[in-house]
Image: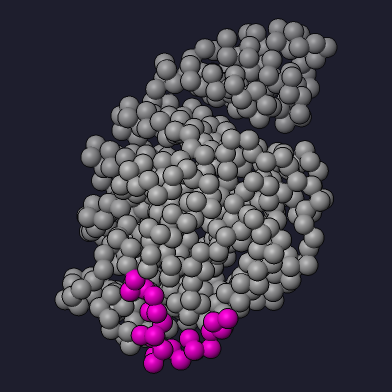
């Protein structure tokens, strides 16, 4: 049956025509109506079909999806919860409900939905991986790690699951379990070396002995015929890090230089486009529209050049129970791109602020200060202040030579950081970020605070108290009110370092490399 030969004088006529038809015809009609944007009739068809075929997952999910797309989220959520109560292992319904909850910023509930669905029994490994990737993308590594390990314990001994468990274990500080998962993945398939395992292994500890098995493993990989270029690059970065741990800076510099040469050859980063963007931001007037400040909470943006101490400061601030760190969110960049081609109206700014606020506040235990620590939100301070004039911007500064060396020592997955593979490009980014920070400091003097990395590591408690006092955190020196441990997941290259006691040996680290990297001397310190 098709719409063309169905009497469409009324919805009731269409439903009468479908009454004796099989489920597939109902689905085809409902989908065709939805494609034609006849939403009301499509909803009527799916609603009636759900009554006609009460045990059809396809119809129930189709109805819930259509309701959600057309602004009826509460009813869609209710339908999905009801379905999952009677069909708890239906992962399709769980994924749809998880996506709906994510849009609302209810990430705790999202995690519980997927945990429950995957606690019902074994699932296909690809389905498990889909859940793990969704949870990781949505900032729920604890639930993703649990699902991985539960599936492995239940007998799904797949190397991909071990690799994912390893990646998640690093974020969560489960370093010994991470090594075990990586070893198992490597035992099962040679392809595992292409899954960032060499870099993962190098980041699990600080090496103290060149006799550690990882050294032989890394050198053996470099001799392997047919090694892919991305994997060779990762191994070189891993060896650079390992030799840096040992204080063998000459060898570390050699490996880092080889790795960066390979990475830079494939870089798509454009210095011209970067400069054009910075000049445009410096020349742009402040947003003519500004929304009212948030009533009972404060967004905090920790910004700066990557590797300047943003993760360390965020983790330290999260010791206050009234502060929550949400990681490096991409929402400010998303909304900047979405609003770039228009002069945004108040309604558009309100939509942006509302959606972004839901991702910051979420549905866990409430706080007052919510931190987005995406460093390059430094580029978008004007937008942040237009959305929330009560926002606070904390700008992390660090000796540019240490920052440059730290960037040059890392392998980044995000192409936005491809500048990090060339010292001249790094110098450009550091210099321009300084100019931009000075610009924002002048424009928003009461909302902008610069904090030096050196202060954080040399006087951590005093610096933390000063920053907390500036934010307005009550009784910032009351240590008894502070959380003793930081348990947030860390999905950056700082995963191991940020879990250690604050140390000072990274201050002035560039001096060890100057004999092997004379270009560091050219990095402008002013």
Determine whether 168 is above or below 509 in the image: above
Residue drawn at x 47%, y 56% as measured from the top left? 466
| In this rendering, position of residue 518 left or right of residue 187 | right
Q: Over which residues does the magenta segment extend?
A: 504-526
Residue 513 is a magenta residue: yes
Dominant SS in magenta: loop
Q: How many marks?
A: 0
Image position, residue 15 (x, y; %): 70, 10
Residue 476 x %, y %: 43, 48
**Quadrant where the image shows the N terminus:** top right
Whether residue 399 sits left or right of residue 9 in the image: it is left
Of residues 483 and 71, the one drawn nearer to the viewer in this rendering: 483
Asked whether residue 273 appears in the rendered view, the answer is no
Which quadrant, please, contains the C terminus? bottom right
The relative height of residue 294 versus residue 21 in the rendered view (above or below) is below
- Residue at x 23% of width, y 75% of height: 215
185 left or right of 265 in image = left
């Amino acid at each position: 049956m098709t719409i063309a030969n169905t009497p469409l004088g009324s919805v009731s006529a269409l439903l009468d025509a479908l009454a004796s038809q099989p489920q597939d015809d109902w689905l085809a009609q409902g989908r065709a109506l939805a494609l034609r944007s006849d939403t009301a009739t499509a909803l009527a068809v799916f609603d009636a079909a759900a009554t006609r075929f009460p045990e059809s997952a396809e119809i129930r999910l189709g109805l819930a999806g259509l309701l959600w797309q057309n602004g009826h989220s509460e009813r869609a959520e209710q339908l999905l919860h009801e379905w999952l109560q009677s069909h708890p292992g239906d992962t399709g319904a769980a994924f749809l409900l998880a996506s709906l909850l994510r849009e609302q910023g209810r990430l705790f509930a999202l995690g519980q939905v997927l945990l429950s669905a995957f606690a019902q029994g074994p699932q296909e490994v690809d389905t498990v991986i889909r859940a793990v990737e969704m949870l990781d993308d949505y900032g729920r590594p604890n639930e993703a790690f649990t699902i991985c390990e539960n599936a492995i314990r239940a007998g799904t001994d797949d190397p991909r699951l071990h690799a994912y468990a390893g990646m998640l274990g690093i974020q969560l500080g489960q370093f010994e379990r991470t090594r075990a998962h990586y070893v198992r993945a490597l035992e099962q398939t040679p392809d595992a070396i292409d899954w960032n395992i060499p870099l993962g292994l190098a980041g699990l500890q600080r090496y103290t002995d060149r006799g550690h098995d990882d050294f032989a493993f890394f050198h053996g990989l470099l001799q392997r015929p047919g090694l892919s270029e991305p994997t060779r690059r990762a191994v070189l970065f891993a060896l650079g890090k390992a030799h840096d741990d040992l204080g063998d800076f000459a060898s570390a510099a050699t490996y880092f230089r080889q790795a960066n040469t390979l990475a830079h050859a494939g870089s798509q980063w454009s210095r011209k486009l970067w400069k054009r963007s910075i000049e445009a931001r410096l020349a742009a007037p402040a947003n003519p529209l500004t929304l009212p400040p948030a009533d009972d909470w404060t967004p905090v943006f920790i910004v700066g050049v990557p590797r300047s101490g943003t993760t360390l400061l965020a983790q330290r601030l999260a010791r206050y129970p009234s502060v929550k760190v949400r990681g490096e969110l991409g929402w400010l960049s998303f909304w900047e791109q979405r609003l770039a081609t228009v002069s945004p109206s108040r309604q558009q700014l309100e939509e942006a602020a509302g959606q972004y606020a839901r991702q910051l506040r979420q549905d866990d235990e409430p706080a007052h200060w919510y931190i987005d620590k995406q460093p390059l939100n430094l580029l978008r301070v004007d937008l942040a202040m237009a959305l929330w004039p009560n926002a606070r911007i904390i700008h992390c500064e660090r000796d540019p030579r240490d920052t440059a060396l730290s960037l040059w020592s890392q392998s980044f997955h995000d192409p936005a950081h491809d500048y990090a593979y060339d010292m001249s490009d790094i110098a450009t980014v550091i210099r321009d970020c300084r100019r931009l920070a000075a610009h924002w400091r002048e424009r928003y003097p009461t909302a902008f605070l610069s904090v030096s990395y050196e202060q954080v590591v040399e006087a951590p408690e005093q610096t933390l108290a000063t920053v907390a006092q500036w934010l307005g955190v009550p009784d910032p020196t009351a240590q008894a009110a502070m959380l003793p441990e930081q348990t947030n997941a860390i999905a950056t290259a700082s995963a191991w370092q940020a879990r250690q006691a604050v140390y000072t040996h990274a201050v002035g680290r560039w001096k060890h490399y100057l004999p092997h990297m004379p270009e560091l001397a050219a990095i402008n310190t002013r």
